Structure formats: C-alpha cells, structure tokens
C-alpha cells in the first residue's frame, strides 16, 4: 500500500507486476477469505505514485436495477471434441453451481455450432430437454431456469441439432442473440429487458466462417499470432459480429463474449481460436484453454465478470479494495463470497452474494483511495 515513486521519463513506460501466492484449493473455496485477499493484493488498487495522498470516500446510492444475466452457451459437439466433451460438461456444471451460489438472477441458453442451411440445424436455437440422440432438435426453443441444472447438463453434452463436422461458432453466436430479440418480460424464449447478455463459446476449432481467409497452418497451436495482412482480413470479417455485440447494429444485442478454445501451445492439438480470441478481447471477455480438465479458475473469473457487469452498484472512485466497508439499508454487510459483498475490480463494482435487496434499497460504501495531487512547478 506504499506509494511508488515514478521515475519514468515522459516518453518511457513502466510496467508494475503484482501478484499473490496461495493454494488453489484455498483460493477457490468461497468459504475462506483467501480468494478476496489474493485479489486485493494483486488487483493494483493499492498502487500509487509517490505524490498521491490517501483520501476517505463515502458513496451513498439507491439501487435502481437488479443483477440479471441471460447466459448463452455455444457448444461444439464435433468428433474432434470427443476428448474434451465430458470436461466441458463437468466445467459447465461447475459454472452453473457457481452461478447459483453467487446470487445472480440468471438463465441459461444452450445452442450448437451447426452449418447454416443444414437439414438438422436451426442456428441459434436453444435446447430445453434431456436427450442422447445426436440429431435431436432440442425441444422448445427457450432459456433454462436455475432449477433446471439436470436439463442444462444434458444440453451441454448434446446441444440441439447436429453440426456435421463444420463449426460455425460466429454465426450461431449471433443468431442465438438475434433469434431471442426483441427483449420481453416473462417470455421464456426472449432475452429479458434488464439482462446482461453473456456468450460463452466452447470449441477446439477455429471458426468455419474464417477458413476461407486463413490456411490450415494458421490454425496450428504453435502459430500464436497472424501476420499483419491476415490479421487485417480477420478483423474485417469480424466487424459485423463486433457491430452486433457492441450494440451498434441493435442496442438490445450488446453482449459480453467469452471463449473456451484453443490457446497458444495447448496440450490437446486444438486449433488456435483466431477470430474468437479477438471478439473476447474487444468485448470484455475471458479466454480459457479448452484442453484443461479443470477450468475452475477461468469459470470463476467469468462468473465474477458477469456479476460485476450486472452489478447495480458501481463506485464513484477506485477504492483501495482492502479498505472497503459496506452497509445495506442501514445494516453492515460483511466481506464474504458466500454471504456478503465482494469487490469486482474490472468493473469497479460491488457484488452482493446471498444478500437480498430490492430496487430502492440504499447502499453505503466507505473506503480509502489514492488521490492524485496537483504539483505546481
């Protein structure tokens, strides 16, 4: 928490790397303090330049919206995913359980990556029934509720329709959003008016939509970066998807995009997620390694980002996170990831976990922050 003297010249840059070390089991255990202590030590909120001073702040506000998210899973069920399918199912169930524990008001939609025009495919359609048939149509096109984890697990393992060996993740992602607009209240097949849209795509393949632009060697897991010409072509092809998910084409379609796909030098020969990676980077998403058997840390980061993005309480200033104290309707709320509040640094927001509140509830957040002092020469 000590100020750091900035000795960089105006045309130089300095990088400060912060971190903390803990047992994974302790970090992932929401009943322990380890998780938020590690985050507070490593999120940079305690770092300042030498001239900064500590100031006390007190934010008082009334909650005008509730944390709501409609989460869309786009699942590759191709043969090349056979080695990772059960891992994806296990991790998706882990994600569902984490979402339940977080207190987030969520629904889940599960769709495929099938080819446009294929007889067994309705792009962007959601699954709503338990089935083991690879050609099953998925039943009624609707979101799944928090009470339907068993159906969700089946749909993740066997999404609606059959992809037939061609993975159109970009088109199915965009259709999954467009097909379930306009937003509506109380409609099982429509995105809710107040919901944040979150897309999580799981695949070991690069998007079929880009395979006319890139060669097979471009997808190699050792080909971590594209040359400038091919990257420019990819960026141009992605523009229509970015325009949609940024809300430029339709403000109701604005979405966060996460990908669990092929990363550089992965261990299961997954294709590099060119295209998906760029979307995640530009749409505030995370990039996870599809080859991992345990995606616990990645999933927790995704859950944290969803809760932060959906949070109704964004702080006025960036706090020194470890100094935060919070009250709801005059009652102190303890810092806890099981029953209390937590801080989401990437959104500068408070998340309330198993703490009941309504529109109109008053939140008071007190904290210390670094304040830049004006030095007159």
Image (spheres, rainbow, N blue to C red):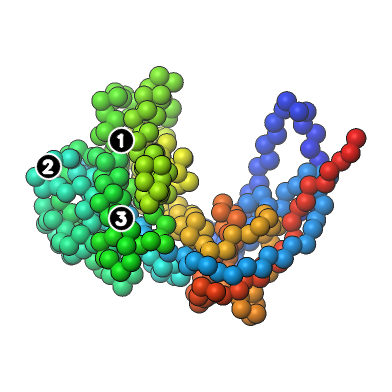
Q: Is residue 313 above or below residue 173?
A: below
* Contact check, label 2 and label 3, Cβ < 8 Å: no
Bin the neighbour count of mark 1 within 10 Å (Cα to Cα): few under 14, some 14-19, many 20 and up: many
Q: Distance between the residues labelled 3 and 1?
A: 30 Å
Q: In which quarter of the image is residue 345?
A: bottom right
Q: Which residue extends farthest top?
A: 229
Is residue 326 shown to the viewer in this render? no
Q: Is residue 104 left or right of residue 186?
A: right
Q: Which quarter of the rendered picture does the N terminus lie within?
A: bottom right
Foreground of the two, 190 or 137: 190
Q: Which quarter of the rendered picture does the C terminus lie within?
A: top right
Q: Distance between the residues labelled 2 and 1?
A: 19 Å
Residue at horizontal 40%, vertical 19%?
A: 229
Q: In this view, does 12 lie above or below 150?
A: above
Query: For mark 2, what is the residue?
Result: 118
Which of disc 1 and disc 2 is earlier in sequence? 2
Q: How many marks on residues?
A: 3
Bin the neighbour count of mark 3 within 10 Å (Cα to Cα): few under 14, some 14-19, many 20 and up: some
Residue at horizontal 36%, vertical 49%?
A: 253
Assign a secondary structure to mark 2.
loop
Query: For mark 3, what is the residue?
Result: 182
Residue at horizontal 26%, vertical 41%?
A: 171
Query: For mark 1, what is the residue?
Result: 206
Foreground of the two, 3 or 269: 3
* Contact check, label 3 and label 1, Cβ < 8 Å: no
Assign a secondary structure to mark 1.
loop
Q: Measured from the top left, where is residue 283 in percent x and y? A: 45, 44
Q: In this view, does 208 lie above or below 283?
A: above
Q: Is residue 154 left or right of residue 219?
A: left
Which of disc 1 and disc 3 is earlier in sequence? 3
Q: Measured from the top left, where is residue 100 in percent x and y? A: 40, 69
Foreground of the two, 137 or 94: 137
């Amino acid at each position: 928490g000590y100020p750091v003297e900035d000795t960089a010249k105006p045309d130089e840059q300095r990088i400060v790397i912060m971190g903390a070390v803990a047992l994974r089991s302790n970090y992932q255990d929401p009943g322990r303090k380890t998780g938020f202590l590690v985050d507070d030590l490593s999120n940079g909120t305690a770092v300042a330049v030498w001239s900064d001073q500590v100031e006390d702040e007190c934010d008082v506000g009334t909650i005008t919206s509730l944390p709501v998210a409609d989460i869309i899973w786009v699942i590759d069920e191709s043969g090349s995913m056979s080695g990772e399918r059960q891992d994806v199912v296990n991790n998706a169930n882990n994600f569902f359980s984490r979402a339940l524990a977080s207190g987030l008001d969520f629904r889940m939609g599960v769709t495929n990556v099938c080819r446009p025009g294929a007889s067994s495919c309705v792009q962007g359609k959601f699954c709503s029934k338990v089935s083991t048939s690879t050609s099953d149509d998925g039943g009624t096109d609707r979101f799944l509720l928090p009470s339907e984890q068993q159906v969700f697990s089946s749909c993740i393992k066997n999404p609606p329709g059959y992809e037939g060996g061609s993975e159109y993740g970009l088109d199915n992602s965009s259709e999954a959003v467009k097909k379930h607009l306009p937003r509506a209240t109380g409609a099982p097949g429509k995105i809710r008016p107040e919901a944040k849209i979150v897309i999580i795509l799981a695949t070991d393949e690069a998007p079929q939509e880009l395979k006319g632009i890139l060669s097979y060697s471009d997808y190699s897991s050792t080909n971590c970066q594209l040359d400038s010409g091919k990257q420019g072509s990819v960026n141009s092809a992605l523009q229509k998807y970015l325009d949609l998910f940024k809300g430029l084409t339709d403000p109701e379609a604005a979405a966060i995009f996460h990908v669990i796909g092929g990363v550089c030098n992965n261990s299961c020969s997954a294709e590099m997620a060119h295209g998906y990676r760029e979307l995640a980077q530009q749409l505030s998403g995370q990039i996870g390694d599809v080859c991992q058997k345990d995606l616990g840390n990645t999933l927790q980061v995704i859950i944290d980002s969803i809760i932060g993005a959906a949070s109704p309480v964004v702080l006025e200033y960036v706090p020194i996170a470890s100094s935060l104290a919070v009250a709801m309707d005059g009652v102190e709320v303890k810092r806890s990831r099981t029953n209390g509040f937590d801080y989401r640094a990437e959104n500068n927001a408070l998340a309330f976990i198993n703490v009941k509140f309504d529109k109109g509830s008053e939140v008071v957040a007190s904290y210390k922050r670094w304040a830049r002092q004006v030095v007159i020469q």
